[in-house]
Image (cartoon, helix red, strand yellow):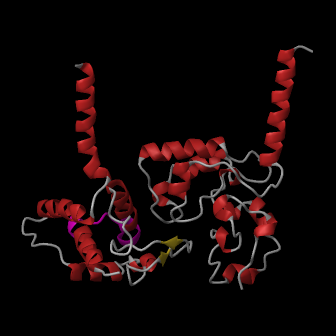
Amino acid sequence: MRRHITVLVVLTGLSVIAPASIAAPADFLKTYEAAARQEAPGFAGFSAQRGAAFYKTTHGREWSCASCHTQNPAASGRHAKTDKPITPLAPAANAKRFARADKVEKWFRRNCNDVLGRECTAREKGDVLAYLMSVKK
Amino acid sequence: MNTANRIGLLVMFVTAVTWTATTRADGHRYTASDPAWKAECGSCHIAYPPALLPAASWRALMSGLDRHFGDDASLDPATRDKITAFLEKNASRKRKLIDATELRISETRWFRHEHDEVPAYVWKNTKVKSPANCAACHLNAEAGDYSERNIRIPR
């Protein structure tokens, strides 16, 4: 009996953890959509076009997303300061992108802070992701 | 000499030989490694060998990752603490060569001494870009190999 309970606890635990650790880009879009509705009740969906503009322009500071990830997110980039190669950001060109929640949140936190000097809103993240998902290899 | 003493001596001998081989054979090879250090410190630049800064410098650096030389390199606390422990354990003990308040490896007296024959134009080369870019000249830097034999200065 005890063993059965242990197995059950482990399985329940896995089903809770699994979606968070291995995800698809569309899963992130859903999460951001829910958060964007919370941010603004009038939220009318993400826009890849808005995301592209956000990605390619600077936001009152030195860098844009494209400074390191290049104007084409399906291409390899280089770190603007250290020159270290960066693998493509667009999921079509790199299956490892937008696959793990901890990584996605870590890089949005850091890079939004570097590019904008603040965290990104859920709408901004969703727009950028919608753009990245629209980019073909 | 009894067997226990003999075994003890043998263990000491093997330890000494291994230590010499890993730390002394070539002062420009660094073997200390850790998966979290490699993954996290190595994502924006080469994961710099812990032996290049003293423990106090690593502690100071790791406590300010949200302002890491002008960039946000913040980590979750558990990963940060794990990496800090690894860096401290394998930090430099050459107090005379590196000031414990120094955070930038390329500004230490040791680094400047090691690179004093490198002409100014090399640092300005767009293929080098920054003294932080070890792998521009040290071909096997990623593997901790900074030996003279594996240096190629780009043109």
Task: Identify which residue, B83 or A121, lies in the foreground.
Answer: B83
The residue at 16%/64% (across/down) is A33
Q: Which residue lies furthest to the left in this view?
A: A42
Looking at the rendering, the stretch of residues picked out in magenta corresponds to A112-123
Q: In which quarter of the image is the N terminus of chain B?
A: top right
Instruction: Tell me where residue A44 appears, x and y as whole percent.
Output: 9, 73
Instruction: Tell me where residue A34 appears, x and y as whole percent.
Output: 14, 60
Q: Is B144 located above or below residue A79 in the figure?
A: above
The residue at 28%/58% (across/down) is A23
Compared across the picture, whether A6 is left or right of B129 comes to left
Q: Is B62 located above or below residue A68 in the figure?
A: above
Instruction: Tell me where residue B44 appears, x and y as whole percent.
Output: 52, 65
Task: Identify which residue, B108 or B148, lies in the foreground.
Answer: B148
Instruction: Tell me where residue B140 appears, x and y as whole percent.
Output: 69, 65
Q: Quadrant of the C terminus of chain B?
A: bottom right
Q: Judge whether residue B40 is colored magenta.
A: no
Regarding residue B75, the answer to whether it shows in the image is: yes
Tell me where residue A113 sits by quadrant: bottom left
Regarding residue A62, the answer to whether it shows in the image is: no
Compared across the picture, whether B119 is left or right of A3 comes to right
